Amino acid sequence: MVLRASLEKKEEKEKVRAALMRAALHLAAAHGFAGLGLREVAREAGIAPTSFYRHFADMEELGTALIREVAGRELRELGDRAMARRETAVGALVEAMLAGVAKDPELMRFLVAERTGASAQFRALLRTELTTLARTLHAAVDGRSPGADRSLSAAESAVSLLFDAAADALDQPKAGRAAAQESLIWAMTALLMAAQGAKP
Amino acid sequence: MVLRASLEKKEEKEKVRAALMRAALHLAAAHGFAGLGLREVAREAGIAPTSFYRHFADMEELGTALIREVAGRELRELGDRAMARRETAVGALVEAMLAGVAKDPELMRFLVAERTGASAQFRALLRTELTTLARTLHAAVDGRSPGADRSLSAAESAVSLLFDAAADALDQPKAGRAAAQESLIWAMTALLMAAQGAKP
DNA sequence: TGTACATCAGTGAACGCGCGTTCACTGATGTAC
DNA sequence: TGTACATCAGTGAACGCGCGTTCACTGATGTAC
């Protein structure tokens, strides 16, 4: 019996799988993920429609993989950036977010769209990821009182503002983003500071 | 030459048109607006597929009408509620919003989805509407200094939080919404107050 | 080392289906005079 | 008032098209011994 496929073979398959996910992100930026067809994605990835099934059972499974793998990694990186500069965590997070928008707009479009999109499953998966990010921000900004309810809900609101700002940035020419960035940092900081001031 | 159709005939047509828009909202709540088909919507509205063209050139035109007419009316009402209780404008706005979620979840789902959805045109139309709402909130909360930049951008952030909260509410059982409502009012108020405090 | 067998990603043909759109028509209603 | 004509929402038939999915097959690669 064959117990393990060769490493090389596995890597080849992984490349095609990644190409499918990237193709889906690319096309979703134009028509939205819900409007994508399996054949359309396979075509963009350069494989036959029937080969799609070697990687995913259907488009929903591909979307789930996109959130768990691609989006999950990106969001964890965002949290790491904030934690790495605890004294300026908000600024670091905002910078990392806007850098992400510039570097991979297709992924960011997918994220902000599916966060409030048509698929309840995608919404639930993304909510989990964003809650994690909010907790990280909360810890970075205020590690000393981990149980403060208001402070955590303020961090969640701050993350909401972060994603709405990303959505705005995606629709704006790069030139106009500087003022928005300053406003965003101000608003997120104001929320987090007010929550600390409101502590018992 | 016929200059005006009779009032009765016009009203009949208006009813079918409204039925088409309502059918689209109903179906979009499940599959998303981008996933809707013209035949599907016509079927739900109880007319033949070809009759659709008597009212809209295509689905995009129907979506535009939904935003301009149905959503526009709802958002203007939200602003009116806030203006009517200027001393508690934020609370009034939040209450009106959550009442809207309970009364017409299909419309609210459409709003929060298309605000960051796949159609650039829908996003642009909704951004205009939300900017208007932010200006109304700004005027209600702080009519005395109409030129304060920070105060206006704080109002815009507050409106962002309002819509994100609506999106959350749509995915929550009604029972769990009370705590979220309190947090939302706190966060919006904190933003608006901080902006006033930060004024030169 | 050689040989027989197992695995599995990729494929092309084929299917039935629902889609968007066109077209010419119907019939109710309104207008002209 | 009666009659001839115009308007227009609604319709069913028909079209070509791309879709998701199944199936049996290929061929490269790995494994057993």
Image (cartoon, coloured by chain):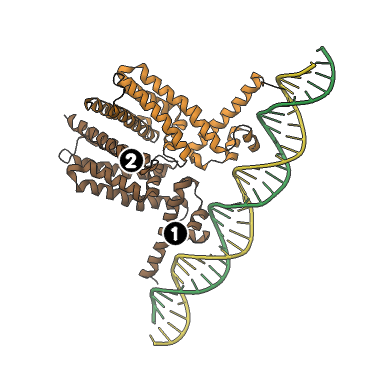
Chain colours: A orange, B brown, C green, D yellow
Write the residue at 22% across / 40% down.
B138
- Badge number at residue B138: none
Answer whether residue B140 is visible to the viewer in this image.
yes
Return the residue at label 1: B55
Q: Secondary structure at mark 2?
A: helix
Write the residue at 46% across / 61% down.
B54
Instruction: State left or right for residue A126 relative to residue A93.
Output: right
Provide the chain ID for the residue under circle 1.
B
- Badge number at residue B177: 2
Q: In which quadrant is the C terminus of chain A drawn?
A: top left
Provide the chain ID for the residue under circle 2.
B
Write the residue at 40% across / 20% down.
A80
Q: In which quadrant is the N terminus of chain A drawn?
A: top right
Give me the C-alpha separation between circle 1 and circle 2: 39 Å
Q: Residues within 10 Å of mark 1 (few under 14, many from 20)?
A: some
- Percent from the top left, x then y, of residue A59? 55, 38
Instruction: State left or right for residue A147 relative to residue A23.
Output: left
For marks 1 and 2 on the same chain, the one whose residue lies earlier in the sequence = 1
Q: Is residue D22 above or below residue A149?
A: below
